Image (cartoon, rainbow, N blue to C red):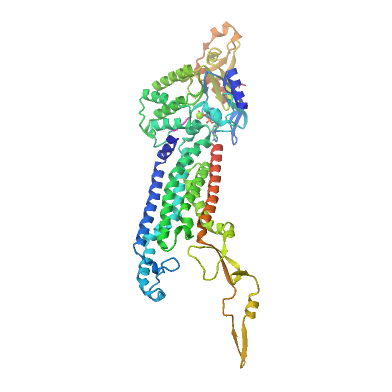
Amino acid sequence: MFDRIWLTYKQQRFETLAVAVMCLGAAAWALLASWHLNSVGVPASCLVDGGVPYWNGPSNASWIPGACQLPSQRFTDALTSLDVGIASSLGDVLPFFVGIAMGAPLVARELEQGTAPLSWSLAGARWKWLAGRILAALLLIVPLLLIAGLAADVLRGAQAPGTDPHASFHYFTSRGVFLVLWGVAALMGSVALGALFGRTMPVVVVALIVCLFARATWEPLTDAYVLRGMTVLQMPGASSPGELLVYESSGLYLDGKPWQGDLDAWWNAHTTCTLTDGAESCVGPSYPGPQLAWYVVTGDHYWQVVALESAIMLAGSAALGALALFWVGRRRPY
Amino acid sequence: MATDAGALVARATGVALQAHGLSKRFGKKTALDAIDLTVPAGSVTALVGPNGAGKTTLIRICMAFERPNGGRVEVDGVDPWKHRSEALRGVGYVPQTPAVYRGLDVDDHLAMARSLHSGFDAEYARKRLNQLGIPLDQRADTLSGGQAAQLGLAIALGTRAKVLLLDEPLANLDPLARREFIQVLIDAIRSDGSTVLLSSHIVTDVEEACDRLVILGAGKVLLDCPLEEARQAHKLTDSKSPPPGGIAVGSFAGKGLTRLTLWRVPADAGEGAAAATEPASLEEVVLGYLAAGRGTTGLQLN
Ligand SMILES: Nc1ncnc2c1ncn2[C@@H]1O[C@H](COP(=O)(O)OP(=O)(O)OP(=O)(O)O)[C@@H](O)[C@H]1O
Ligand SMILES: [Mg+2]
């Protein structure tokens, strides 16, 4: 088994090296960017809502206490600097590059280079042959992407100094264990496409498009179908740091409870109008009336949400892997 | 269970490879046309035929690379399409185009074979490559065409398989390597009792090692008999008049401007037939059948 894993890396040495460099480079960059942010040293007393107040220039920052204005300004500069900007967007692309780089050639290159007849004749059961290669790829990318994902968590923590990245849904699908999950899904998908197409380049192109689409639709879809049941109605002014806005209710709420009623009738009933000298003056209620409701998942459900979404993504990856094993068993080796 | 029984039957009847009404079509092109073929265990069968005759297709079906459109094959009693890993466990294969991994060295190939095939004898393959002077640490993509073919052969022989399916293994070898290869093949059969099906264009190359001859032409089996019988039951003339009891097979251009005709002469045709005509060489037998298969004579077989 060890031989097979090692030979898989040796066969794909360029991809193996590229994947290692990309992951470790991204992790190092994220840690450097975190260090850059931490080095500003914003005092804890300046944090508002778990974060450093955003410095919007002297005229707009009058609400920031005087002593916090300079740290806020410096932190905002660091936050919008190029190195931090690039580091925080790496998590959106890295797992796809890594998964596709390892997965696309896994079957397709054997077919392109005409070596599949040899290895398939020796292996007998093709699914075992492919499973061995997938295992080799997983052993490489899982730890590397985990390192990159944890570094991205550290960076997220540094970007919002008052919040725990593991109790905050900010960009949570672009960091932490999600990097591994996206990478594994991209790997399995591109292996399956490789078994279907038998050519590396078309696999890379199609896999990139599919990944882009999956990434863009993941959050709307999970919000709509997975997380709805976990939401709570948010009280006005009670927003907690790190919470995830899942949806805005089309209904209204009043006094912390969903409210369905005739808005005009409510306001009419709660407004007193007086007619003085032919001019009407009205006085509304002294408390907020019905408002648009926000349904959120609070930060303390972080691990629950991660576990749920991980299970879905792993199930999807397993299905793609099974498809790859099935296709490789049915196709011609050339 | 059914396949085990099949294997037992195959062993008992001494059949290593069998095709029944085997057909393969690629679109409108018929590559194999309902062929029947039996390769006895322990034999070395030369599979001869012109380009496009279906030799590679037949071997690929035996390797479960292609699915037949009709009929079936059994390798050591097992249908490779239905029980692939069981069928392939006992088969060593050399593809027509040498398959080497770019970027892996020769020894990596042997390590790969060992990791994929439980019974692979890497030492045996290594020894063979050493004898041929092929460095184990050389990158396989820098090997010459013949050396790459030798690597493929070493891997196939290293499987110590009972059935060897070799698709033109000699095509890239120099004359000395051909002779050596034939020797190795003869050794392998003697020591392991292997069965070999070996495709080739040039029958004289494999004459020494083979004991059976199968001629494929346009997807049909034109001749399937022991080599000795092929030699003795055919005569060659430069005239249109048949030897006594002879049945015309095909005619082809001889040396100079003569047109030669191959005749099949049944064993009971009498002494006169043998005396009256030239005995045909194996190459001429093949040429006669190929001409018949291509339809360049008035006479069609089968
Ligand atoms: N995958 C394929 N798709 C379409 N046609 C094919 C395919 N494979 C083989 N053929 C056709 O089937 C016929 C038999 O091909 P095959 O490769 O078996 O011939 P061959 O006897 O091995 O020839 P050669 O001596 O040139 O190797 C040819 O006409 C070939 O064009
Ligand atoms: Mg061929």
Q: Residue at x 60, y 67 (%)?
A: A250
Q: From the viewer's perspective, is residue A2 above or below residue A46?
A: above
Magenta residues (range): B95-99
Q: Answer with left or right where residue B77 lies relative to residue A204.
A: right
Q: Residue furthest left?
A: A39
Q: From the viewer's perspective, is residue B28 above or below residue B232?
A: below
Please provide percent x and percent y for residue A164: 44, 60
In front of the other: B258 or B270: B270
Q: From the viewer's perspective, is residue B293 above or below residue B277?
A: below
In front of the other: B199 or A209: A209
In front of the other: A72 or A17: A72
Q: Residue at x 65, y 74 (%)?
A: A262
Please provide percent x and percent y for residue B249: 58, 18
Identify the image quadrant of the N terminus of chain A. top left
Can residue B146 be seen at all in this image of the molecule? yes
Please provide percent x and percent y for residue B256: 46, 19
Q: Is residue B228 magenta?
A: no
Can residue B258 be seen at all in this image of the molecule? no
Q: Answer with left or right where residue B27 lies relative to residue A64.
A: right
* Magenta stretch secondary structure, dominant: loop
* Tally of numbered tags: 0
In front of the other: B126 or A58: A58
Q: Is residue B97 magenta?
A: yes
Please provide percent x and percent y for residue B214: 55, 21
Q: From the viewer's perspective, is residue A99 above or below residue A247?
A: above
Q: Residue furthest top?
A: B271
